[in-house]
Amino acid sequence: MHFHKHEIDLGYHSIRKIRYDARMKINSANIGGMQCAKEFSEHKSRVNSLNYSTDGMHMISSSDDESIVLYNCDSGIKTRTLNSKKYGVDLIHFSHNVTDAIHCSTKVDDTIRYLSLHDNKYIRYFSGHSKKVITLAMSPIDDTFISSSLDRSIRLWDLRSPNCQGLMQLQHKAIAAFDPEGLIFAAGVNSEHIKLYDLRSYDKGPFATFQLEQEARCEWTSMKFSPNGKQILMCTNGEHMKLVDSFSGNITYELKGHQNNKRFALEATFSPDSNFVFCGSSDNKIYSWSTDTGNVAATLPTKHNSTCFQQVAFNPRYYVLASACSNVFFWVPSEDE
């Protein structure tokens, strides 16, 4: 595959053309024909997080070089670069507008920080975790967000208050995620249990607990619900991921075929229709799997640096896939599709 850095225009008319709707179905054929449309080299170290705005028009990335970059997905351009040299930055997420974001710290302490992207000033700090934060996620419906840490706790917060709104102290390390409706959250505990909690009554304990076989050679590193809420994807630092039925707790498929020689915490993503999962690989390819069959649907060769290629994220509204090592790439369907 040939890469043309600026050949495909991601301008207004083009992004309307690739809007995810009835006119543009995502299937294995057009996934295999995706092309690299844009390349950004703003970051100088590993990109540790990618996140889209809810409307899909904006994306934000953070890096180990302590920089934050904002992108306009409508025009396919970088709009701003900010820095967090004092505290570092990881797991960055937009709040419910594109002028603010939350992120965890990599220096000084393990405080979560609420940043105004407009004037690069902090609005609020959320203190409580005593070790590295490994999960950070916004509720899809309100100002609630959730965090988990190597201190074996899960905390619920509200953007409007610095005080922790809910604390769950666990016996083992856990990851966490909101469901698409923002009514429940899931905790993945000790790489073997998935616990589901009602946000309105989480203090009463989980309303469902799924026991899975404990991972022998790797750990769960993140989890996410499919956009339709029917499946939970368990990402690992090994060479497989698990798709779990969110109602029964049964393992639907183990997604395999990609490589992870360096045991990275590879970040995978669902397509907006929930029919495909995408993940990077040590062989510098992006792999996609069908959630209907569990089989590899397509692979895309990339120019990524395999020493730091961990991030992929599918736009929630448009047929645009982002991937990142230290550089960030935007992928779109072939103009023939």
Image: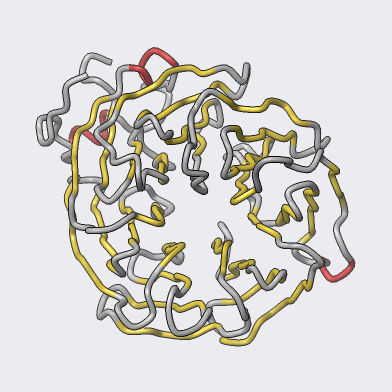
Q: Nearer the viewer, residue 112 or 262?
A: 262
Query: Left or right: 129 with respect to 6?
Result: right
Locate residue 156: give its quadrant.
Answer: bottom right
Query: Left or right: 39 with respect to 311?
Result: left
x%, y% of residue 197?
79, 58
Locate residue 65: give its quadrant.
Answer: bottom left
The residue located at (58%, 39%) in the rendering is 238
Q: Is residue 56 above or below residue 241?
A: below
The residue located at (62%, 48%) in the rendering is 223
x%, y% of residue 320?
33, 36
x%, y% of residue 164?
66, 82
Q: Quadrant of the C terminus?
A: top left
The residue located at (53%, 23%) in the rendering is 257
Q: Nearer the viewer, residue 69 or 2?
A: 2
Q: How is the image coloured?
A: secondary structure
x%, y% of residue 85?
29, 78
Query: Left or right: 203 with respect to 199?
Result: right
Q: Nearer the viewer, residue 259 or 79?
A: 259
Q: Is residue 8 above or below residue 212?
A: above
Q: Quadrant of the N terminus?
A: top left
Query: Left or right: 102 with respect to 34?
Result: right
Q: Nearer the viewer, residue 309 or 230?
A: 309
The residue located at (10%, 30%) in the rendering is 7
Q: Is residue 167 above or below residue 98?
A: below
Q: How many marks?
A: 0
